[in-house]
Image (spheres, rainbow, N blue to C red):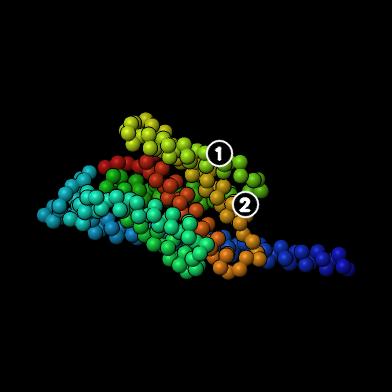
Amino acid sequence: MADLRNFQTRAQTGELIDQGLRTYMLKVYNLMALGLAITGIAAYGILALTTTNDPASAAATVHGTLLTSAGVAIYGSPLRWVVMLAPLAAVFFLSFRINSMSVSAARTTFLVYAALVGLSLSSIFLVYTTGSVVQTFFITAASFGALSLYGYTTKRSLSGMGSFMMMGLFGLILASLVNIFMQSSALQFAISAIGVLVFAGLTAYDTQRIKELYFEADNSDVAGRKAIMGALTLYLDFINLFMFLLQFMGNRK
């Protein structure tokens, strides 16, 4: 009888852990999805503010797109550096300060970061056709979903693959810096293709790592911060996978 009670207790504990893990991962995915939605809304809003279909009110033309005076200020003046660097500053601030922030402040910072990314990414509509951007987004979403599901369900440890992908990421950064000066289309094609593979692998690895970080005894603040950092990690994987796929298969104007 004692063995039976112990077995029942362990089974009930396992069910509670599984339920807590599902709740935790759902929180991560919901927050990540909210961040992506805010990014999309911000990008569309900035695009509407900075472009026009009226040639009489246009201040400049870029790749056949008519820019308003706001568009010239954002994309054609030194302000563009603020637009480019603001998301980087926000993500570093959140990463280094999250342990000293309240959960609500960390969540707000993440959502502000997502909006800043949307501001920065609005420029892709000046380079790529709207149809290819939308198509690439849905391809990214389907690929991300499959890869993240694999990372969540597999029993195989992905730590070795994660280490390999992190080395690939550093290689991508170095190659991208080199190509700023070389301006090689062949190298850019290789960077885009390798970038897709690297962030595909990181999506599965990061999902497994976020799952393993779950601890049922965490208090609400610790669990909340873990969920926010998990959402940020997967958000970055999604955005980078999307950008590399767009460079690889997007139709330029």
Query: Is 26 located above or below residue 135 in the figure?
Result: below
- Relative to 7, 179 lies left or right: left
Query: Between residues 209 and 34, which one lies in front from this camera angle?
Result: 209
Tell me which residue sits at (79%, 66%) in the image: 8
Return the residue at label 1: 164
Q: Position of residue 191 (x, y in %)?
A: 42, 36
Q: Nearer the viewer, residue 107 or 198?
A: 107
**Label 1 crowd bin: few (<14), some (14–19), many (20+), radius 10 Å:** some
Q: Name the residue under label 2.
A: 153
Closer-to-camera residue (100/67): 100
Q: Is residue 171 above or below residue 62?
A: above
Which kind of residue does numbered mark 2 sit on?
A: Thr
Q: How far apart are marks 2 and 1 (CA)?
A: 21 Å
The mark that comes first in sequence, 2 or 1, is 2
Q: Label 1 sits on what residue type?
A: Phe
Q: Which residue is drawn at 55% across and 39% down?
A: 164
Tell me which corner region of the image, top left, top right, bottom left or bottom right, holds residue 193.
top left
